[in-house]
Amino acid sequence: MVSLTITQPDDWHLHVRDGDALADIMSETTRCFARAIIMPNLNPPVTTTQQAEAYRQRIMLAIPDDVNFTPLMTLYLTDQTDPEEIELARASGFVHAVKYYPAGATTNSDSGVTDIRKTYNALQALSDNGIPLLIHGEVTDPNSDVFEREKLFIDQVLTQIIRDFPDLKIVLEHITTKHAVEFILAQSDNLAATITPHHLLYNRNAMFKGGIRPHYYCLPILKHEQHRLALVDAATSGNPKFFLGTDSAPHAVANKESSCGCAGIYNAPVAIELYTYIFEQAGALDKLEDFASLYGPRFYNLPTNTSELTLVKQSWTVPANKPLASETIIPLCNGEQLSWQVQT
Ligand code: NCD
Ligand code: ZN
């Protein structure tokens, strides 16, 4: 049987929610990832180190004792974030980044930043402390075209942040365009990007195949095929500026299949399998470990995992749905056959 063993990977962008759903969601990530950057967009958001510690403890309680997993916590940047809070985050040892959501850009971003200049004292503290700023890179002008929002953000906001804070480490999260790839390549090593499995696998047609398909709706939205191809090239290029971040974003089925469905794709049950397939299709399986397991920790100045993960080439069928506390959730690739499987 064909198999592939790599250093155990980490997920550098993950939503796990809270409460009764935590245990179901965590089990999908801990089956293959050793660590994950935990997004702070709860309601209310995780804005302080104290809240991050309480959230970290709830996550650990949702994981069986014999499972080896470390949540890497983040704070949610607001117009009010105090530079002293950044110092507390640094001292904590468990907060590894701060997340910038432009207010109104996506799920639970209402408390986000209204004008980046309001956060400049906090950004200076991040820069001084070597804490990465993670960016949801889309403008929020409702009149802007939804497919153009990433490019507009890069040109109008990100360029300005990099100019004003050249030493700040930045991850442009879940990039979706050729423009983003080219921009990142042109900047210093302080700028990196995560890439999701869904943006590597699908273009915007997926949302409209034979009808409207809400489970392919996420933000930033799927783009034209030319952008997907640029993302595959970037991910499989062996450039350390690009690394794995699933943006797995669970929403119960009723919140997705609605007249105004939530943005977010639940890919944790299939993510590492899909990345493996994508790298195989690109003839770059030898680069998977770099992307999935080595470049993330290098950017975050964390040690590489010492454990390993084995994937076997063996077909299996993704369940049609999964339990989410008392509700149901539809995973990406539901009902489909995948060619790679995690060895248990
Ligand atoms: C995320 C969520 O549901 O929390 N949704 C998404 O479409 N990616 C928020 C985000 O990362 O934009
Ligand atoms: Zn996200």
Image (spheres, helix red, strand yellow):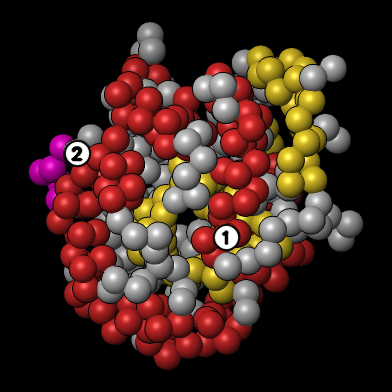
Q: How many marks?
A: 2
Position of residue 12 relative to residue 264, above or below, is below
Q: Which mark is residue 286?
A: none
**Residue identifier under label 2:** 148
Position of residue 303 relative to residue 229, above or below, is below
The magenta segment is 141-145
Residue drawn at point x = 63 percent, y = 66 percent: 302
Query: Residue 341 colored magenta?
Result: no
Q: Residue furthest bottom?
A: 84
Disc 2 and disc 1 in contact, CB within 8 angstroms: no
Estimate the spatial distance between the alpha carbons at disc 2 and disc 1, rounded to whole Å. Answer: 31 Å
State which quarter of the image contains the C terminus: top right
Which badge, 2 or 1, comes first in the chain's sequence? Answer: 2
Position of residue 215 relative to residue 193, above or below, is above
> Image check: 293 left or right of 74?
right
Mark 1, other Cα within 10 Å: few <14 / some 14–19 / many ≥20: few
Task: Report x, y in % for residue 335.
Answer: 63, 17
Judging from the image, what secondary structure is the residue with disc 1 in?
A: helix
Secondary structure predominantly adopted by residues drawn in magenta = loop
Residue drawn at point x = 28 percent, y = 73 percent: 165
